[in-house]
Amino acid sequence: MAKRVKKTDVYNSLIIETIRDMKVLAGRGNFTAKQELNGVTVLVDGDSNADLIFRDQQRAQSGYIESPVGPHPKPKLSAKDVASDKRISDANEARWAKEAAARKVIQDKKEREFFAELGTCPAMERDEAKWQEGIKAQKGEGYGLACYTYAEYWARLMQKKMAEGYKLEAIADECSHKADIPVGITGFMYGCAVSTLAHCWKHGESLRRWHNKETQLGTEGDKANESGGVLNPALLCIG
């Protein structure tokens, strides 16, 4: 007689540990535990081999086999299984390489266009002493220097648009995305760039106030504007 199947909802930091937890629950309740793990339906009995189920969960996750997997996978993969897995793996690798090459062509084009436009932008109007002090404080660390690189690109793009008659508030967001094309920043880095520009750039105070108003969820941006602070979007949370 087949065991009843019961959906479980246990999660560990590692998939193999979650499978082991499912096995314990299944053994205690004398049922077959069922759970989705990274898009794969996993079935586990109290007497299942967790390592074998994990093996097949990984195979299903990679697209080598269909789910569900378990509760009692074959102990050893056949030569046909191994060959099939390799064939699918090779096809996946070839597809990913092709997709990566296509993305690189697009990215390279965007970067060429970006630097061509940057070449028409004026030099950043900044307090050079404060700027160099900040650069020196990074001690050659790539993450921090990337914030400065992004901040300079962003400022120069904004300066060009403002020289054409645009208000900072109207072009800051558009320029922020364009400046990110050759850098690749995080939300935290974006906030750091705003802080840097607020500290060093000629139009930094206007940018700081715009940024705080745009970023706030309630009234915290208004408060930051009064205190002289800068909201970092990567640190905001909804309570």
Image: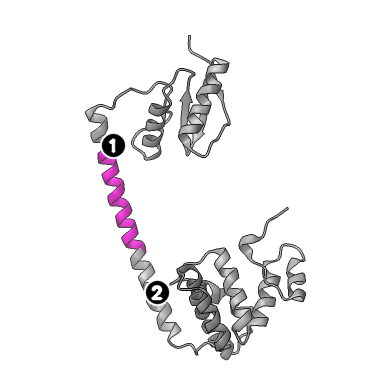
Give the residue pinned by disc 2.
111
Neighbours of disc 1 within 10 Å: few (<14), some (14-19), many (20+):
some
- Residue at x-position 67% and y-position 71%: 230
Going by the picture, which residue comes out furthest to the top? 1
Magenta region: 86-103
Amino acid under disc 1: Asp
Residue 235 in the magenta stretch? The answer is no
Magenta residues, dominant SS class: helix
Residue 101 placed where, x, y %?
31, 61
Mark seen at residue 124: none
Q: Are marks 2 and 1 in contact (CB under 8 Å)?
A: no
- Residue at x-position 60% and y-position 84%: 201
**Residue 18 left/right relative to 238:** left
- Dividing the picture into quadrants, the one containing residue 72 is top left
In 3D space, how far apart are the residues under numbered discs 2 and 1 (Cα atoms)? 38 Å
- Residue at x-position 76% and y-position 71%: 222
Question: Circle 2 sits in a helix, a strand or a loop, which is it?
Answer: helix
Question: Circle 1 sits in a helix, a strand or a loop, which is it?
Answer: helix
Is residue 44 in view? yes
Q: Nearer the viewer, residue 225 or 2?
A: 225
Q: Earlier in the sequence, mark 2 or mark 1?
A: 1
Q: Nearer the viewer, residue 50 or 222?
A: 50
Q: Nearer the viewer, residue 149 or 4?
A: 149
Give the residue pinned by disc 1.
85
Residue 91 in the magenta stretch? The answer is yes
Amino acid under disc 2: Glu
- Dividing the picture into quadrants, the one containing residue 238 is bottom right
Is residue 34 in view? no
Q: In the displayed structure, would residue 29 be above or below residue 99?
A: above
Residue 26 placed where, x, y %?
53, 20
